[in-house]
Image (tube, grey):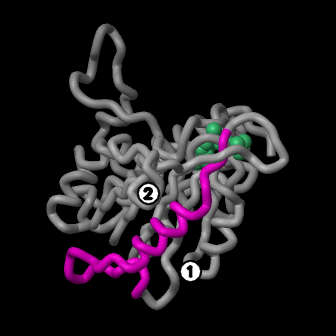
């Protein structure tokens, strides 16, 4: 899978060279390129912004550098054999435009995007990108405005770091043990159960006894109850949208004990 990120602060994306994503990049499991938007300007000052039509505070990102950058990225050859060129896949590549006015990014979107051969990310700054860029780009890309959450950041880079990490860790081979992806928060609509490691007693606090029983069915039930209790306490809205068929009698009992009213 190939990731292309366009930003006026390419150094902001440097952490993607660290840890599991960096290792996956080095090993050729994914391809990652960060492009400086200012390289696609034509004036001496490498200008990427201008005042907004209609007045108002702040600056808006000019359209032409974005068109030049996106056209260039579309035509880049893939460097790793087997990884799709952005413009040569069967369908147009996905262009992710981070925006607080976008659809909220969550695990099922990460899952869906991890199946794509290539993703392009356009990091906005200032008051955002001239809206016509999205319209122009929709003839070349599948444009997806995505928000990290209901708050405003200074730029798209932090959102891209989070999205690339969430998507790339779902690519087979990036996370060493694939089993560890299965039981995580949001994978089945619930939050993950609490986890513990040695020692069994730490500063007077014991781990739940069931975890020492060696009894797999009881441990699985304990963990499921903890998932339900934690979700009911912290994120009850997730339970409201969960497929009710996925809840058995024991689950409903655990929810009742957690004080969750359906
Ligand atoms: N004026 C814009 C609005 O109110 O929708 C906010 C612009 S923000 C200061 C600058 C850039 O930060 C945006 O273009 C976007 O790339 C990024 N950004 C800010 N908040 C974000 C969020 N919650 N999710 C994703 N990207 C965000």
- Quarter assignment of residue 97: bottom right
Q: Which of 200 and 233 is in front in this view?
A: 233
Q: Residue at x 43, y 34 (%)?
A: 194
| Residue at 50% over, 56% down | 187
Does residue 175 sit above or below 69 in this rendering? above
Q: Name the residue under label 1.
A: 140
Q: Residue furthest front?
A: 44
Q: Is residue 194 left or right of residue 243?
A: left
Report the front residue among 152 and 196.
152
Image-based side of 216 in relation to 68, left or right: left
Does residue 254 appear in the picture of this structure?
no
Residue 216 location (% of width, % of height): 34, 50
Q: What SS does tag 1 mark?
A: loop
Return the residue nearer the eye: 216 or 51: 51
Residue 223 locus on image (x, y percent): 46, 43
Q: Is residue 154 above or below residue 237?
A: above
Q: Is residue 226 visible?
A: yes
**Chain part drawn in magenta:** 59-88
Residue 60 falls inside the magenta stretch: yes
Kindly identify which numbered label has been placed on residue 6. Answer: 2
Secondary structure type for disc 2: strand
């Amino acid at each position: 899978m190939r990731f292309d990120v366009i930003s006026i602060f390419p150094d902001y994306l440097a952490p993607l060279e660290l840890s599991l994503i960096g290792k996956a990049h080095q090993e050729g499991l994914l391809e990652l390129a960060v492009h400086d938007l200012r390289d696609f300007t034509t004036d001496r000052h490498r200008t990427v912004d201008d005042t907004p039509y209609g007045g108002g505070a702040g600056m808006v990102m000019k359209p032409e550098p974005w068109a030049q950058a996106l056209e260039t990225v579309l035509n880049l050859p893939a460097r790793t054999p087997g990884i799709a060129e952005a413009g040569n896949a069967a369908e147009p590549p996905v262009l992710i435009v981070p925006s607080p006015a976008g659809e909220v990014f969550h695990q099922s979107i990460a899952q869906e995007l991890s199946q794509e051969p290539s993703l392009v990310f356009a990091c906005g700054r200032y008051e955002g990108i001239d809206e016509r860029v999205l319209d122009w780009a929709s003839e070349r890309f599948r444009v997806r405005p995505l928000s990290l959450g209901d708050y405003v950041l200074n730029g798209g880079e932090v959102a891209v770091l989070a999205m690339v990490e969430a998507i790339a860790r779902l690519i087979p081979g990036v996370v060493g043990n694939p089993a560890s992806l299965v039981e995580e928060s949001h994978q089945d609509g619930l939050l993950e159960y609490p986890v513990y490691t040695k020692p069994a007693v730490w500063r007077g606090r014991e781990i739940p006894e069931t975890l020492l029983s060696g009894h797999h069915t009881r441990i699985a039930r304990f963990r499921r109850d903890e998932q339900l209790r934690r979700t009911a306490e912290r994120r009850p809205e997730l339970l409201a949208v969960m497929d009710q068929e996925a809840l058995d009698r024991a689950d409903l009992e655990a929810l009742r004990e957690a004080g969750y009213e359906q």
